[in-house]
Amino acid sequence: MPTPHVSVEGFDTQTPTGCMRMNAERTQETSLLTGCERCWPESAEAAWKARSDLRERAMWIYESHFNVRGLECQHCTRRFVSVFTENIDWAHGDDTQNWMMAPVTVSEYRRLEALLASSIEAALRVVPAARRSLCRHHPSGDDARTFWTTGIDIGLQD
Ligand SMILES: [Zn+2]
């Protein structure tokens, strides 16, 4: 059955280029937000190394097993939100550590900062779920892995 041919606001919704253009505009704000080649290189391992060059703008939450920080690239001024969590392994004393980090716009940064006072969960939801993020996972008794993922999900609802 042929699908109806509809035109919306001057472009043909049936053509893939129309869809792609719309997606590109949307992803600009979400998954494609990046930093420069210094702070957000192609490889996840390199991005993890580059993290140590970022300037700390804010230490919003600093607890021994949980912290949330605002970082900034000294080269391109891109801001990042970084979250560290540690799950205590009482049996082995070797705790699972997790770092997640995502680039944010200045307005997202401010919104996140404002929300942190009332709800950490709501604050971290400011980072779009589709936003490319960096994760370093160091499981108890195993080697650390660094990989690209999306959003900042630290399982606060658990
Ligand atoms: Zn940068």
Image (spheres, rainbow, N blue to C red):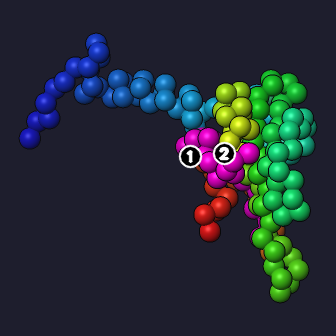
The region drawn magenta spans 117-139
Q: Residue sitting at 77 percent across and 46 percent down?
A: 82
Which residue bears the numbered disc 1?
A: 129
Mark pair 1, 2: CA separation: 13 Å
70 with respect to 21 (left or right): right
Question: Vertical placement of 40 versus 125: above or below?
Answer: above
38 with respect to 134 (left or right): right
Figure quadrant of residue 59? top right
Q: Which mark is residue 140?
A: none
Which residue bears the numbered disc 2?
A: 123
Q: Is residue 128 magenta?
A: yes
Q: Residue sitting at 86 percent across and 76 percent down?
A: 94
* Residue 40 position within the rendered picture, expressed as x and y whole percent measured from the top left: 75, 36
Instruction: Choose between 152 and 149: the one closer to the eye.
Output: 152
For mark 1, give the secondary structure: loop
The residue sitting at the top extreme is: 10
Label 1 packing within 10 angstroms: few (<14), some (14-19), many (20+):
some
Quadrant holding ligand 1?
top right
Figure quadrant of residue 98? bottom right
Question: Vertical placement of 83 versus 112: above or below?
Answer: below
Which residue type does callout 2 highlight?
Ala
